[in-house]
Image (cartoon, rainbow, N blue to C red):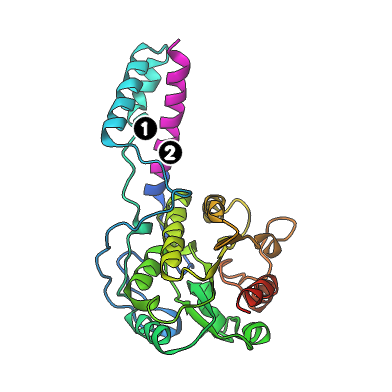
Amino acid sequence: MRTPSFLTLLAGATLAALTVGDLAAQTPPPGTNAAAPGGGGRGRGGFPRGPMLPPGPPAPVPPEVAMPRPTAEEVARINTALQGFIATSPDQALLRKYESLLMVQVPRDNPCIRPTGGNLSFRHQGFMSIATNRDFELMFLGDSITDLWNVTADPQGNAGGKNVFNKYFADVKVANFGISGDTTQGVLWRLQNGESKGHKPKAVMLMLGTNNTGGASGAEIAEGIGAIVLQLRQDFPGAKIMLLAIFPRGSGPADPNRRKCEEANKIIAKLHDGKHVFFTDINAKFLDAKGGLIGFRPADNLHPVEEGYEIWAAAVAPTLKEWIK
């Protein structure tokens, strides 16, 4: 019988169409630190952002997180089969009405794996100097959530993680390569353009991806993180990588960006190999019984305050210090 197989195809096509529609509808939510398309705005501490460079070619992605990408020929064959099913279906009129939504599309180019940079050259130049001239054992890599380990409070008076950092990591040689507003494509560009050249850390803590939620799916974000892990393995073959789950965000479990991060986390967990890459999910420690955030700014439900940095450091410092002995 042909009907069951075509129904399966139909369900898959509907899911694909809904995913494409979701991507098209996403815009960065107000009050987040998501980088605006093409650059613009200011980084942490008011550093001006310059113009963005054109995106580079797609970075390679580990097979564990690679999205299925049918060819144009395969898509044409699927859609021909779907049209044949619609033509013989008792629900033909209804299916014709929504035919454009049911047809499978060739997956779009994933911006999360195209290295993009140049908008924070001041910070980038400083990190390249650290990589070349400074001795360090542990690298922190990420966006503002990592960047704010550097400050007691930001210019708006929001508490950062500096006091907690001093408590847990004062005896460790750490290089913090976090930049507020950064994305997977930004970190890829930074690594490929000098920040991984020079000193080789014994361990890397990577926490990244929340700034990609404004325009990417969870699967696309996972590919971006996977591409960074692959780059780190190439650049620092002797280092252990603590790959943190993207931290929870939003006011509750139904927050769409939290769900997107959770989708990405389920995928990047596959990168754990227990030898070089260690997926580490501490998110439950940040959540109360109703799924509300513990230790984050109430104003944005995104950035940790000192309590959140305490939870974070207490969870990861023993392992990181063991790795760099």
Asked if disc 1 and disc 2 are in contact, CB closer than 8 Å, the reply is yes
Placement of 313 over or under 252, stated as above or below: below
Instruction: Give the x, y percent position of residue 290.
Output: 72, 55
138 relative position to 127: left or right: right
Residues packed near mark 1 inside 10 Å, few (<14), some (14 to 19) or many (20 plus):
some
Residue appearing at x 47%, y 50% in the figure: 65
Three-letter amino acid code at the position of disc 2: Leu
Q: What mark, if any, has residue 18 been given in the picture?
A: 2
Q: Is residue 289 magenta?
A: no
Q: Quadrant of residue 56?
A: bottom left
Residue appearing at x 60%, y 81% in the figure: 161
Placement of 216 over or under 72, stated as above or below: below
Q: Secondary structure at mark 2?
A: helix
129 relative position to 266: left or right: left
Q: Is residue 6 magenta?
A: yes
Q: What mark, if any, has residue 101 been given in the picture?
A: 1
Towards the viewer: 322 or 97: 322
Q: Quadrant of residue 187?
A: bottom left
Q: Residue furthest right?
A: 289
Instruction: Give the x, y percent position of residue 200.
Output: 46, 78
Instruction: Give the x, y percent position of residue 10.
Output: 42, 25
Q: Quadrant of the C terminus?
A: bottom right
Placement of 29 over or under 110, stated as above or below: below
* Region of the chain picked out in magenta, as a range: 1-21
Instruction: Give the x, y percent position of residue 167.
Output: 68, 86
Q: Secondary structure at mark 1?
A: helix
Residues packed near mark 2 inside 10 Å, few (<14), some (14 to 19) or many (20 plus):
some
